[in-house]
Image (spheres, coloured by chain):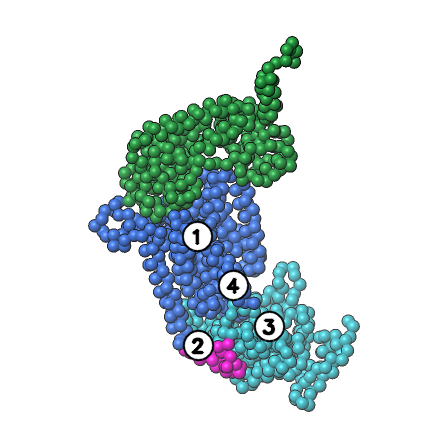
Amino acid sequence: MSIRRRIATVVVAFAVFAIAVMIWAPTVGSTPISLARAFDRSIPWDDNVDAQIFFVARLPRVLAGGLVGATLAAAGVVLQALLRNPLATPFTLGVSAGASLGAMLAVSARLELSVLGITSIPLASFAGSLIATAIVYALASSQRRGLSTNVLLLAGVTLNAFFSAVILFVQYLADFAEALRAIRWMMGGLDVASYVPIIAAIPFIVVSFGAFAMMTRTLNLLSVGTEAAASRGVDIVGAQRLAFISASLATGAAVSLGGPIGFIGIIVPHLVRLIVGSDHRIVLPASALFGAAFLVLCDLAARTVMSPLEIPVGVVTALIGGPFFLWLLVKRS
Amino acid sequence: MSALLWADNVSFRYAAGAPLVVDGVTVRLDDGALAGILGPNGSGKTTLLRLLSGTRRPTSGRVLVRDRPLGQLSRREAARQIAVVPQETELAFEYRAIEIVLMGRHPHLGVFTVEGPDDVRIAEDALAATGTSHLADRMFHELSGGEKQRVVIAAALAQSANLLLLDEPTASLDLGYQLEVSSLLRRLNQEHGVTMAISTHDLNLAASICRELILMRDGRVLAAGPTAEVLTPDNVKRLYDVEADVQVNDATGHMTVVPVRRIPS
Amino acid sequence: MRFFRQPPPLGGLFVAIFVVALSAQSPKRIISLVPNVTEILFAIGAGPQVVAVSNYDVEPPEVRSLPTVGALVDPDTEKIISLRPDLVITYGSQTDLQAQLKRAAIPFFDYRHGGLDHIMVTMRALGARTGHVEQAEKVARDLEAAINAVRTRVAGKPRPRTLLVFGREPGSLRNIYASAGRGFLHDMLVVAGGEDVLTDVDRESAQVSTEMILARKPDVILELNAATRLNEADLKAVVDPWMTLSAVPAVRNKRVIILNGPGLTVPGPRVVDGIEKMANALHP
């Protein structure tokens, strides 16, 4: 089978799976609804509970879950290739710490602004993620030779630690309700009940995915070695810059939409590589698709398993992620 | 016919104010050459190789590829002319051998282009040339040291470049694999006309296959020319501070160097 | 001490000893880390005995000039001990502080929030502990009477299904927290004549999803807001996000009601204010 055919076949298979999940997910939940009623245009909107459950409560949630899941998984793939380390996550380089600090400050400052329908926490967390990205980038580019991945890693880890400390400090100064609000945000949540935050995140994610698409073969070459890649015609510094900035931008947008939901960026790429191998031209799109389906399924569990109570979706991904890693470790040894 | 590669009095320092790592070196490689760049660790061999491949720009002097300045070629154009076999290959993820070899086709492919049947054929030919066709679908990290190195050489061949630069190709290999790889290189040069420059500190490797040598010490060229002329006990002493016995070995037919005694410097 | 010609009646002696012993036992230096208990202390007449309060105490106005010793998560143990209290009001979860007080041989009163009744229980218990039994009894009775008055007022009226929301991301419908089947918020709602839509959830509070709200179809949504004053524009801004759930009866019938004001739901002597506000909203 030609390479092109193989790539297409695998990606299409993952796409079918992801689309099936995303079509099925809004039809199920803790409340039984009638799809016929939900789609019945003759019933006035204000009277149609089934329609509102489908279109206001569930559909935005599924779409947000798909978008965030796809983005975090793809960003994870890119960062793992950039740092040449399968244990890297979209949060390794400080982006999510910046986002969390932004959110925390917005909560403590009692910021209540709304720009184009986006509320203060998503705005502040996106700003925080951009600032964290800029700081890490500046630190790593300070040497004249362009981006050094070692310095990138060190800068990211240090920034994570520093921002986390600041977050704790701000939390300590905040009152109980504010601290609780921030903690709850950090556990992740997809119940947006509105299409506005999703639409707001889309441009950034689309741009980043465009960059990802251009980078796939380059990521293959980078993972064999930077000197080897350079001798094969790869612009190392340019590729690393593009990878870092696009992955950070995408992560910032995803975290602003759903909070810092962990484990997607590492479980999904791992699982996908186990199934399809390491060619990033397959791994990247497959991870995005699988990540979308995976998060939507996790959120489905979060909103049904303990009904009428909600489990924060980040808790669900963590509960699945932990044992998964143990299993991986055991399997490896 | 102009030289395939000509490094004209190149010098290099890693940062302003730092000492010169390569100091006024001139190297000329004609088509079909099999040259060895020989010297102790720290002599600037690896850096010189980087200058020759275009990975680094010389601080002074110029590198010409068939009379065209290397610095003016785009990275991809340069990669189509010059391929590098690095000293070590550490994969971050698990790839099959054929995937590694196909990566050599990168300079010939556009951003969104996927390897076509021609590319696959070139890759398979490269594997055949290095005697590793049977390893195509094996996972790279499961191969032996010698097999890995041959696959990496195949990847460099797949680049369809005119010149192959090898950085310590046998340094990390067991004796048997050393022989395997060195005879492969000689065969590629003689039967397939691949021009090569090998950077090494292994005197006997250089003596066994290189037809010409460039001896380097402290960033400068000590001596350059045909192997038989250049590889003398005197030059070995100047290069390594070692008294050595240099002669043609009856069994192999090429020169060998046997170190005898260290000369305190 | 006066010298009697005859020995005083034994009962009188007994009472005298009892009173002396009691006032010798009554704490003179009370520190309270729980704001609603501070309010109770002042209501039952133990105010003069309070020497320090928590960082979040604002009522009654007398406490604002008192030294503060931290709060729920960060009580300043050193400062507390240095003030030489003979009774410290702690919250049930402050086990570290309680252990340290034990070591310093300082008695403490262990309080936890409970149902509405628990307020009166706490009043009486503190009355006994601080030597204000009579006043505590009076305050508790008055409070019970006021609560019953509301109960009577709404008795017989149909009880609207109500969602009592106390937390939400401003400007959106994310992270909605509501009172559930237990606790004083739930009891307040029941007394005020409402039927809690989350009455089957055996917790004090729950995070509800938009789907849950649509499914449970509350007739009234009461949202607690801490702002002291909300003008019309503010009010509209707060209510606006609810409009997307127009199939919810409360939204459709314009019965999303914001109850604002600090201290609306403090389980203490002012709790009747909150209950009355709720009752007025549910049964205008």
Q: Nearer the viewer, mark 2 or mark 4?
A: 4
From what the image shows, is residue C70 above or below residue A243?
Answer: above
Which residue is disc 2 drawn over? B119
Residues at marks 2 and 4, CA–CA distance in whole angstroms: 39 Å
Q: Residue furthest top?
A: C5
Q: Secondary structure at mark 4?
A: helix
Badge 2 local density, few (<14 within 10 Å), some, or many (20+)? many
What chain is colored cyan? B
**Which color is chain A depicted in?**
blue
Which residue is disc 1 drawn over? A313
Bounds of the magenta segment: B117-138
B214 relative position to C90: left or right: right
Which residue is disc 4 drawn over? A327
Residues at marks 1 and 2, CA–CA distance in whole angstroms: 46 Å
Q: Nearer the viewer, residue A34 or A238?
A: A34
In terms of image quadrants, where is residue A172?
top right
Amino acid type shown at disc 3: Gln
Mark found first going from the N terminus, 1 or 4: 1
